[in-house]
Amino acid sequence: MPKFVNCPNELAPAFDVAEKLIIPLFRGFKRDPEGGAIKVEEERYVISRAESLTVAMKQQLSSVLGSGAGVVIYQIGKSTGAADAKFYIEKTEALNPIQRLSMGMVLFAMSGNANITILPESKTTLNDDFLLVYDHSNSHEAEAHLKAGLPRDMPVGFFGAGYSAGWGSEALGMKLDVQEIACTVMGHQQCRFVMAPSHRVRDRVKEMKALFSL
């Protein structure tokens, strides 16, 4: 069974393969503080403090853009997720679309963003009916906002939602978007997200909110 993602049994084989593809890539983790670099197989990485990356960036963007700050963070996440997906898919030569999608969730956990649980309401058909309903446990975005004591009247997982949308779009060759429908910052038990084709995501969000009484 997969170690990093909780999923329905029918998706477990794809995540088993995804872990076998992603985990070995990080065995060459090298720190070079004297040279000011962290590298994994000669690829450059950086470490950022979660609260600085999420809370401080949102506050700064909000001072300039107001309520549009979340949209900008979402788009940053989306471009980052798409770029990462392209890199890791080429690196591993993964061909199966669902395995490609699964790799992103494995990497998401390994990178310290959150642990993911895929709910049985999901439908991983590669057409307009595609639907992924999933929870982020131990979300770094929610944790940072709670720690900072910020307002709790709306979801805060903009980067995670965007990253998943970007990765999913690249992995499946579909235009996908993601919306958070529940958030621990607002007092919910989990941070819950809905991924669907872009032109259907609003309807899917309405359906899932009704289903989960949100």
Image: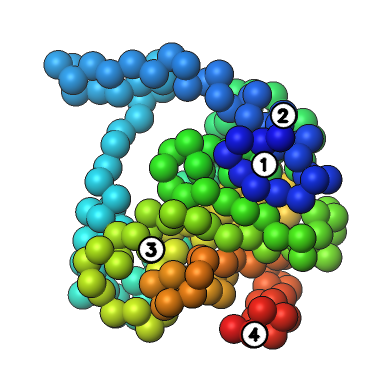
Considering the numbered disc 4 on the image, is that residue within a helix, a strand or a loop?
loop
Q: Is residue 8 above or below residue 106?
A: below
What amino acid is labelled 4 in the image? Ser
**Relative side of 78 to 147, left or right:** right
**Relative side of 85 to 68, left or right:** right
Q: CA distance from mark 3 to mark 2?
A: 29 Å
Determine crowd level at label 3: few under 14, some 14-19, many 20+ residues with C-alpha closer than 10 A. many
Q: Which residue is mark 3?
A: 142
Q: Closest to the observer: 86 or 152?
A: 152
Image location of residue 72, percent across then percent down:
39, 65
What amino acid is labelled 3 in the image? Ala
What amino acid is labelled 2 in the image? Val
Q: Residue at x 62, y 53 (%)?
A: 117
Considering the numbered disc 1 on the image, is that residue within a helix, a strand or a loop?
helix
Q: CA distance from mark 1 to mark 3?
A: 23 Å
Q: CA distance from mark 2 to mark 1?
A: 9 Å
Q: Which residue is mark 1?
A: 102
Q: Earlier in the sequence, mark 2 or mark 1?
A: 2
Question: Answer yes or no: do the residues labelled 1 and 3 have beta carbons within 8 Å?
Answer: no
Q: Earlier in the sequence, mark 1 or mark 3?
A: 1
Question: Answer yes or no: do the residues labelled 3 and 2 have beta carbons within 8 Å?
Answer: no
In this orientation, does residue 202 appear? no
Question: Answer yes or no: do the residues labelled 2 and 1 have beta carbons within 8 Å?
Answer: yes
Which quadrant of the structure image shows residue 111? Answer: top left
Which label is found at residue 17?
2
Q: Nearer the viewer, mark 1 or mark 3?
A: 3
Q: Residue at x 57, y 67 (%)?
A: 192
Q: Which residue is mark 4?
A: 213
In this orientation, does residue 50 appear? yes
